[in-house]
Image (cartoon, coloured by chain):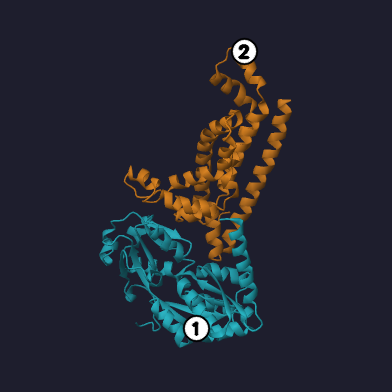
Amino acid sequence: MTFKELFRITLGVVTASLMGTSAFAAQTNVAVAANFTDAAKEIAAAFKKKTGHDTVLSFGSSGQLYTQITQDAPFQIMLSADEERPKKLISDGLGVADSQFTYAIGKLVLWSKDPNLVTGEATLTNGTFAKLSICNPVAAPYGAAAIETMKSLKLYDALQPKLVEGANITQAFQFVATGNAEIGFVALSQLRGNTGGSRWLVPQNLYKPIKQDAVLLKKGAGSGAAAALMVFLKGPEARAIIEKYGYAFDSNS
Amino acid sequence: MQDLPPDIWIAIRLTIELAATATVILLIVATPIAWWLSRSRARWKEAVAAIVALPLVLPPTVLGYYLLVLLGPSGPGGFVAGLWGARTLAFTFEGLVIGSVIYSMPFVVQPIRNAFDALGDRPLEVAATLRASPIRAFWTVAVPLARRGFLTGTVLGFAHTVGEFGIVLMIGGSIPGKTKVLSVAIYDYVETSQWHEASILAAGMVVFAFVVILSMMLIEKRVSRVGE
């Protein structure tokens, strides 16, 4: 890279950021559970197109984001991967009462890059792999759902020595994507556009539905952009995107 | 302290084992590098010195990323792991040792090199005139005179490995007893709002760091006084 190029890029970034703060468009900061990363980016783009508001997304495990919010993080909305943490935020006095709603129901998938490895429940029973990747079950609801699934199948004790833990679902996915773990429990949304490998959509009767709730935080209470995004999330455009990523809306589906 | 869950003790033990193993390997690897950097007249030696020092500047995520790929099934680490039937060196104690050695290398090489530099040519020339072979001169003259550098390097290498976090988080997989070291345990406790455990461990690390730095200062002072 030459200095000229560097200069041009820097100039571009500066101009873009200056333009971003135009008179009418506001900005809202959103804490997003890692499984919702791609969907949230797409929703933010659609939201920007429709309203002109900018959305600044921060990703992490629900537990991590919750901890940050309790420590005064500048988030206006939290898109959690569970319903407990939004509920707790409201009872902590950090969330706006009655703002909580379920924006998506997450689906758990057992996934491998090897096209022949995952055939179904039998893959877990046979255990012909060295490492099974999950995310931290205490911090991330998908990790808890993975543990619950293994326990429902009475395989947890057998599989436990093979578990490797990512701090969030993105890392659990990346352990499998880099081939360091042959297999892993990931979110269905992470496999969008990925037709390779083999996968097993874990039947819903093996784990409690992952009800992913949104909550308006006290820091966003006065923000028009935050309020608009909460409304937008329930609207048809956002729901179409959410559905596209494999999420459900009805916990019985 | 009784109310600490047993996994904390597992993490403490693992951290000490990792730091001790890495420090021993570091001393073995760093000593010839430091010696060469100190004695060589090669024009490109500062380039080698810069490579050794890279971890000082690079974010741990860069090393973590490379290690994740290199230790994995399609990298050299996967080949090595294949020798005993495994697929990857990620998620293993050995993998963490490799990461720690790279990460802490500058903290061991630099003080030893400085100590070798400070020797000057004179003591070795004297040893040579007394018919000591270069290897003998190295062990009986250079190493003892550079003891302060070795001591500093050992303490810094050990302490810096204890303080390692980003790389372990990226290649460790948080396995209790194998890759879940203290720094990762603290991270997990904070992420899951277990403040009690987090604060005990965090305070413990502050005390540890203080003791390490203070004792190093005191030892250095003493060694330099004895050396005079």
Q: Which residue is mark 1?
A: A233
Q: Position of residue B196 (x, y in %)?
A: 59, 61
Do the residues marked 2 and 1 share a common chain? no
Q: Spot the residue most to the top.
A: B130
- Residue neighbourhood size for the residue with mark 1, other residues' Cα within 10 Å, grouped as few (<14), some (14–19), many (≥20): many
**Between A57 and A4, which is closer to the camera in this rendering?**
A4
Question: Residue type at mark 1?
Answer: Leu
Label 2: chain letter: B
- Could one spot residue B16 in this view of the protein? no
Colour representing chain A: cyan
> Residue drawn at (50%, 37%), measured in percent from left and top?
B25
Q: Give B3 or A93, whichever is nearer the viewer.
A: A93
> Do labels 2 and 1 touch, CB within 8 Å?
no
Looking at the image, which residue is at 50% across and 43% down?
Answer: B17
Q: Colour of chain B?
A: orange
Q: Quadrant of the C terminus of chain B?
A: top right
Q: In the figure, is residue A51 to the left or right of A238?
A: right
> Dot 2 corresponds to which residue?
B129
